[in-house]
Every structure is written in structure tokens, then in C-alpha cells.
Amino acid sequence: MSERHFAFWPETHPRSMSVPASSVFFNAEVAAARYPDRPYLIYYDTPLSFGEFRAQAECLAGYLQEACGVKKGDRVLLFMQNSPQFAIGYYGILRADAVVVPVNPMNLSNELRHYLRDSGAKVALAGQEVLAQLQPLLQVGLERIIVAAYSDYLRQPTDLQLPDFVAAPREAVAVPGITLWVDALARDLRPAPAQCGPDDLCVMPYTSGTTGNPKGCMHSHRTVMHTLVAGEYWFSLKPDTTRLAALPFFHVTGMQGSMNGPLFTGATVVLQTRWDRDNAARLIERYRIAAWTAIPTMLIDFLSNPRLGNYDLSSLRRLCGGGAAMPEAIAQRLLDMGITYVEGYGLSETIAPSHLNPPQRAKKQCLGIPIYDVDSRVVDSEFRELPPGEVGEIITAGPQVFLGYWNNPQASATSFIELEGKRFLRTGDLGRIDEDGYFFLVDRLKRMINAAGFKVWPAEVEAMLYQHPAIHEACVIGVRDAHRGETVKAVVVLKDGQRGRVSEADLIAWAREHMAAYKVPRLVSFVDALPKSATGKIMWRTLQEAENAKDDR
């Protein structure tokens, strides 16, 4: 890595970091041994100690192995919202020597089918509010479901506003192949001795790209360990630094920064299942929360709360996140509160950050600098490194870079290049470096829409739209949105005879029934034909540039 990147390296921090050569589950054992009675999770005022957490994760692991037949290396679907059961499920899967496949709980049956087929998962852990989406796949590849009611972990009275599905009582299920979470734990089965080491597969988050189907990013215990430890070290976080967790755990930022990292350190996490700005402010005041990983959209909503002045937020000192650039006005308002928002950059392929701003000298709308042991560069189309100020593709090599895409050697091969004996990941993002060595995002080579922090891959949405019987052709583009950053628009050519019989509202309603809400086109435009190249390929960039030109006027 260039010396330029070290000019503002955090003081007292070494440039290289020694990462424990152990499984990620071992972090739960260490925390339980050190702080057995301290709360790891506080869930709507109900605590779950580190000791209880480890014990329940091991009970679940025993059930997965003995009752469900899960073996080392098997993939297990984790289909839940933020909850104690998500964290217990994640670590229970790891203790069973299996691989976590975290899936956005907004996905519907049609989308879940791909995750199950591609990963080969035979067992799933699910929240009862999303069971209806998973149950149709039972016995069609999926063999067992363990279903959890979040209300089982609400043991203390609370004055916090509870989402209906969190407060909902546990429902009885009498379906072969489905077991209630409480019944699985009640079996109190012991897992076999742990076998996984640092180079075994740990977790497989899915991401899409230029093709329609999401791809599984293979991460080992070693790659996962790097960023969960790096985040804790970078911000000098301590066991007594209480955190707020509001980002989803299925996403790598929430997974590492708000679940795995605090467990490694032995810190308490105050957990929200569904974002609620009043609850967030009340929890910061009640538990003297000091650190919070949040995306700009969340903070915009938080700061716009007219009741914010009613709460004591003086404990909050560390705010970090990414996913989109923080608007100048919001960053300034946080500064006026004595808080610097520290932005970072990472991908599913890097299991969270590869770049972070130095906390003592953070720049706005900036990706930051490469973190410990990461070599990142901006290169031209011939992969020659570019000088400061010039725009090229960001490439990254480091201990946290994924092993490749599951069952997709072709996509894996095209994602990497070899330079100076190192394997660099092609991020598909265009950026530049300034004179201080900080990275800035300029544009994307890959088609991707960032809607309120959720990555929407146009090709995936197009593939689903083509299942509509009235659609002849479709192209999905992004539209700037003042609140969400970007939103999804579908430009559609209808089949002969369908014009006037199918409306924009009809297509949007259909999409809501067939895809996760964040992927649904909020705008639909009918056209007679889509622009095409000489080889017949739809020229999506022409439509995107035309849309951008509208916004610029």
C-alpha cells in the first residue's frame, strides 16, 4: 500500500493486525468465559447474558446435528429479522460446523427458491412472521424448518413501542418438518466436538451483479474474523462501550459491526428488530449508548424527529456507517452535536469494510483509506495504477476478500486479477484518490441501484419482471430520490394487445406480490421500444443517462 495512505493513519495503531486463528464461534466461548452474567443483547428491555447466549447456541447446534442431520460444511438458511434468535441461530449454525446463509427477510417464496437451490440448504431457521414464504418450499428441496417467535425473548415489561409481529404470541405449528424454536432448545442436545478451523467456510451472503441470479460469496472464518476485529480496533471500542444495533444482521455491515464485532469485544448490544426513531432515541438515553453503526437514510429520519430534543443523547460519541454518501447538511448537524460521522466502504465480497476514514480526521462523502493489511488501488482499463485525481476502477486485495462465488467458477474468475503476486478483487466501482491518500467513489461499472441502503441489481429485477405475462421487454434503471438516495424505475414494452389493458399501477402491484419490497419498481414507464445495440442488446446506459439528464435540468 502506498505511503500516501498512511499520512493520517490513526495514532497508536499498528499498520498490520494479527487476527486470531480460530473459528468465529470461539469468540462466543471467550466472551461467555470472561463476562458470563453481563448482557450481550438487550431486546426491548429484556437482557440475554453472554453465558445464556453461548448455552443456547450450543443447544441449537446439538439439535441441528442430531435431529436435523446437519454435518460439517452443510449450508443452513437463516431467514429472520434482527432478534436474539438471529444471533443465536447464526452462532448455533457455526457451532454445528455448518455454513450460515443469511437471507433478507423481505424476500418472497419465488426468490427464496433460488437461495435454497443454489446453496443446497436442506434446513432453515425462520421467524414465524415469514414462515408463510418458506413453508411452500418444504419438501421441495427444503427438509426442516425451525420457526421462532420473537416474543419468546420478551421476558421483562417494557414501555417501548413494539412492532406487532414482535409482540405476537407464539403460534402452534402442526406441520411435518417444522419445529418450534423453544421445542428445539428444550431437547437440550449437546453438539459433537467442534471441527471447524479458520479456513473452513463460515458464512455465505448473497449478492447479485450483471446477471439475474444472486451469487453466494464464500467467506471463511478467517476472512470474517478480519473485519469484525478490524472494526473494533479501528474505533478503539471497549467492552463497556454499549452499542445500538438497528441495521439488519443479514447484511454484512450490521452482521460485522453490530453483532460479531461486539461479541468479540464483550460489549452489550441494544437491539431493535424494526427501525423506530423514537425507540432509538429512548434507548440511547436509557442505556447510555455510546456507539452506533447507521446508514445516512436512518440518520436523516432520526434527526428529523421533532421530539428529538426531549431525549438526552449526550452519551453518543461514535457514529459510523456507509452504503451511501452522507449529505453535507446532516453531517454538519451531527458535528454541531459534537459527533463526527465516520464513513467507510466495503462489499459483500469483503464482508464489510475494506476502507474506513481515520476517526480523528474523517472526510465527508469519502470512502476513507484502506484498513489493516489491505492494498487498494485505482487503475485504468489496463490495470495500471493511476495518480491522485484520476478516475479508474477500485481494486482491492486483503485478508477479508472472499474466496469466490459458490458454484460459479466463471464469475469468480472474472472478479479477480493478479498484480505483483497478489490477487485483487475488481470492485466494479469507479473512484479516485486525493493527495492525502483518501478514496472517493465517482461512479459504478456495475449496474446497481442503492435504495435506502439496499442494493438493487437491475438484472435480477428484470428477470422477475419477465415472468409477467404482459411484458415483452423490460429495462430497470435508477432514479434519484431525495429520501432514499435512489429508487427503482422499470421501462417496459408490453406485448401486442396489452397496451391499455395493463396499467403502471397493475405492474407495481404485481411486483409487490413477487419480489422483496425494496426491489419493487416505484415508477413504471411504457414505451414502444427499448434502445438496442447493433447486436440486439438493450442499451440500459442510454436510458439511465436520459433519466439522469432529466434530474439535472
Image: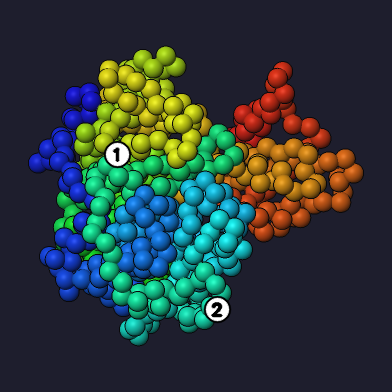
At 16% across and 60% down in the image, what residue appears? 30
Q: Is residue 160 visible?
A: no
At 24% across and 47% down in the image, what residue appears? 197
Q: Position of residue 277 (x, y in %)?
A: 42, 66
Q: Residues within 10 Å of mark 1 (few under 14, many from 20)?
A: many
Q: Position of residue 490 (x, y in %)?
A: 68, 43
Quarter of the image that includes the N terminus:
top left
**Disc 1 element:** loop
Depth order, front residue of 291/69 = 69
Identify the mark nearer the N-term, 2 or 1. Answer: 2
Depth order, front residue of 364/188 = 188
At 27% across and 73% down in the image, what residue appears? 48
Give the amino acid at mark 2: Ala
Check residue 50 in the rendering and tell me which mark sits there, or answer none.
Answer: none
Question: Where is mark 1, residue-wise?
Answer: 400
Name the image quarter holding residue 436.
top left
Instruction: Tell whether 337 sits left or right of 209.
Output: left
Question: Where is mark 2, residue-wise?
Answer: 174
The Cα atoms of the two marked residues, 2 and 1, are separated by 43 Å
Q: Is residue 172 visible?
A: yes
Q: Position of residue 36 (x, y in %)?
A: 16, 71
Instruction: Tell whether 541 sits left or right of 72.
Output: right
Give the amino acid at mark 1: Gln
When the figure is inspected, residue 153 is found, relative to residue 385, above or below; the finding is below
**Could you tell me if the residues under marks 2 and 1 are in contact, i.e. CB atoms within 8 Å?**
no
Name the image quarter holding residue 475.
top right
At 40% across and 52% down in the image, what residue appears? 74
**Disc 2 element:** loop
Q: Nearer the viewer, mark 2 or mark 1?
A: 2
Depth order, front residue of 405/490 = 405
Quarter of the image that includes the C terminus:
top right
When the figure is inspected, residue 284 is found, relative to residue 318, above or below; the finding is below
